[in-house]
Amino acid sequence: DAGVIQSPRHEVTEMGQEVTLRCKPISGHDYLFWYRQTMMRGLELLIYFNNNVPIDDSGMPEDRFSAKMPNASFSTLKIQPSEPRDSAVYFCASSSSPGQGASEQFFGPGTRLTVL
Amino acid sequence: GENVEQHPSTLSVQEGDSAVIKCTYSDSASNYFPWYKQELGKRPQLIIDIRSNVGEKKDQRIAVTLNKTAKHFSLHITETQPEDSAVYFCAASNQAGGNEKLTFGTGTRLTIIP
């Protein structure tokens, strides 16, 4: 398996532009997570899905952020409009839960977003 | 919600010595405690985890201990090596109802001095 795949790996954009980050989870995993990592705030959970359904979006900072999972093999995180304070590394992770509680979350390589 | 505090934020140890990182959590219902290691520029990766029905777990040079009464857990690395240099994150989760949400600590940057 190729692991969790994220694209793009780096994104530089200007304030006010729309940004779309993409994630392909590990095949067979039924949980998908979006995290944001910054020096100031550490690793924050933004939202997670189970079987393509959003379960907890309490970490989504504001209405400018939205996430979708149209099928089991694809998810997007969109920021519109983007702001300089959105600059961070965004990680997607996936896991499978065999009925015994949380199992290992496998992280993708991350997308480094810079908003100028 | 859950709050996880992690100390110290930075730690330097001589190669071959032991390193200990400590975390406390606030939700007494939390029952799953993983540790992730993140090397510079890389993704976080699970190195060890423990569930609330055990007090200690070991895997070669790393071990995790859990004190449910005090609501704290610790990572112990023995015989440290240069490749142990990384940022380590603790996390906690309440698994009730199929919840998979992890709350992470703020991380500890461990530097092994050759």
Image (cartoon, rainbow, N blue to C red):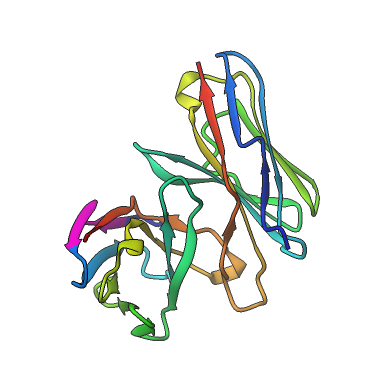
Q: Position of residue A69 (x, y in %)?
A: 75, 45
Q: Is residue B27 left or right of residue A108?
A: left
The residue at 18%/62% (across/down) is: B13
Q: Is residue B5 left or right of residue B90?
A: left
> In what quadrant of the picture does the N terminus of chain A appear?
bottom right
Q: Where A86 sits versus B90, above or below?
A: above
Q: Determine if the magenta segment contains residue A24.
A: no
Q: Which residues are magenta?
A: B5-13
The residue at 36%/38% (across/down) is: A39
The residue at 41%/48% (across/down) is: B40
Q: Position of residue A12 (x, y in %)?
A: 57, 22
- Front-most of residues B39 and A88: B39
- Front-most of residues A113 and B81: B81
Q: Position of residue B99 (x, y in %)?
A: 57, 64
Provide the major secondary structure of the magenta segment.
strand
Q: Where A114 sits versus B97, above or below?
A: above
Query: Looking at this rendering, what residue extends furthest in the right direction?
Result: A71
Q: Quadrant of residue A30?
A: bottom right
Q: Quadrant of residue A75?
A: top right
